[in-house]
Amino acid sequence: MHIKKIESFANEFVGFVRLTADSGDQGWGQVSTYHSDITASILHRQVAPWVLGRDTGDLDDLLDTVLEREHKFPGSYLCRAIGGFDTALWDLQARQREVPVTELLGGSAGKLRAYASSMKRDITPDAEADRLKKLRDEKGFDAFKVRAGAEVGRNQDEWPGRTEQIIPLMRQQLGDDVDLLIDANSCYSPKRAIEIGYQLQEHGFCHFEEPCPYWLLEQTKEVTEALDIDVTGGEQDCLLTTWKQMIDQRVVDIVQPDILYVGGIARTRRVVEMASQAGLPVTPHCANLSMVTLFTMHLLRAIPNAGKYLEFSIEGEDYYPLQQNLFVECPYTVVDGHVQVTDTPGWGAEPHPEWLARSTYQESNL
């Protein structure tokens, strides 16, 4: 199969991609959120010239070719743009075969346990506990993630004492039967991260995410080796060489690639395979309800080393206006703490025509 047209529909926050094959078949994907308008331009400038009209049968080789041709630009934006092409191609191929993408990946439709993922730091621990208890009672969530420290905070808290308050309060308020996760977003030095880690262990937390600056692998490894709690990370990393180093050195206990930061499903599967060979589980990062959560759902239904749950954003329009009114029908429903991968062909979602009409349009053709 060959792709004859690449279209993008983007604003600053979200960018959808539509591919058209030489057969006339089409598929939808997405470049990564945040500065998606910039990423869409890179898709047309630096990805389209190397993929239009090329055989898509060996996707790994095709994407490697893009990165080789653009070897002076090995970083995040190029990978985020490649992800738009990759995810639209998977949708196109699955629609051709009238199956969900997860079936192409070796999986099947079905349920996934989800954890309620809070993005907020500017919320008091008491208010956080109240909204999580409401979600527990209304949606059946039995796993929750909150935030520690300040984002890339150089050992500072969002305000003094917040982290020390929220750790015991979450266990007290949510009970002993739930899994508790926490994300430090690169806040701590190893010494401080280990101190926080001991508090987390005391209160039965099971997941300590990105405790140290993510680019300093040796610091995260020091924390991993010092604690019993699972130390996790990797959401920011897009280079497969970094992933190999992280996994070979067992820098973390659980790997967390973001499908669109890495560069799509095919490249994420290569991370999954490295982790599988090392005996490490994969719990991908997918922190908003754009298409990235759908991509992650389909992947988790198909891989042997899937982690315990899917990350599911609980933030509404006040925090994530970007995820409002994206689809003709909302593809996400949480029942008893689980989401459902349907047997609808492709990703199981259609971008809303009104959203597309308000976006900036670009097109690349053969």
Image (spheres, grey):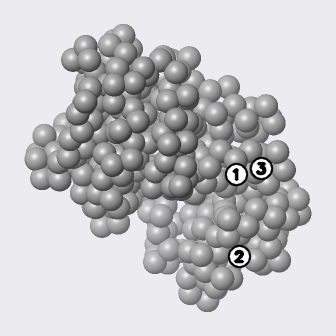
Point out which mark residue 188 bears.
2
Which residue sits at x=76%, y=77%? 189
Q: Disc 2, disc 3: CB below 8 Å? A: no
- Specify the amino acid type for callout 1: Thr
Which is closer to the viewer, label 2 or label 1? Answer: 1
Which residue sits at x=24%, y=57%? 11
Quarter of the view holding residue 92: top left
The CA span between labels 2 and 3 is 21 Å
Mark 2 falls on what kind of element?
loop
- Between 161 and 177, the residue placed more toward the observer is 161
Q: How many residues crowd around disc 1 within 10 Å: few (fewer than 14), some, or many (20 or more)?
A: some
- Between 161 and 273, the residue placed more toward the observer is 273
Label located before the other in sequence (2 or 3)? 2
From the image, tell me which residue sits under label 3. 245
Of all residues, the one furthest to the right in this rendering is: 226
Mark 1 falls on what kind of element?
helix
Which residue sits at x=48%, y=22%? 102
- Between 343 and 101, the residue placed more toward the observer is 101
Measured as percent of width and height from the top left, residue 352 is found at 17, 40
Q: Disc 2, disc 1: CB below 8 Å? A: no
- Specify the amino acid type for callout 3: Gln
From the image, tell me which residue sits under label 1. 242
- Specify the amino acid type for callout 2: Tyr
Q: Is residue 173 visible?
A: no
Mark 3 falls on what kind of element?
helix
Q: Disc 3, disc 1: CB below 8 Å? A: yes
- Between 210 and 127, the residue placed more toward the observer is 210
The CA span between labels 3 and 1 is 5 Å
Up/down of 3 relative to 29, above or below: above
Quarter of the view holding residue 347: top left
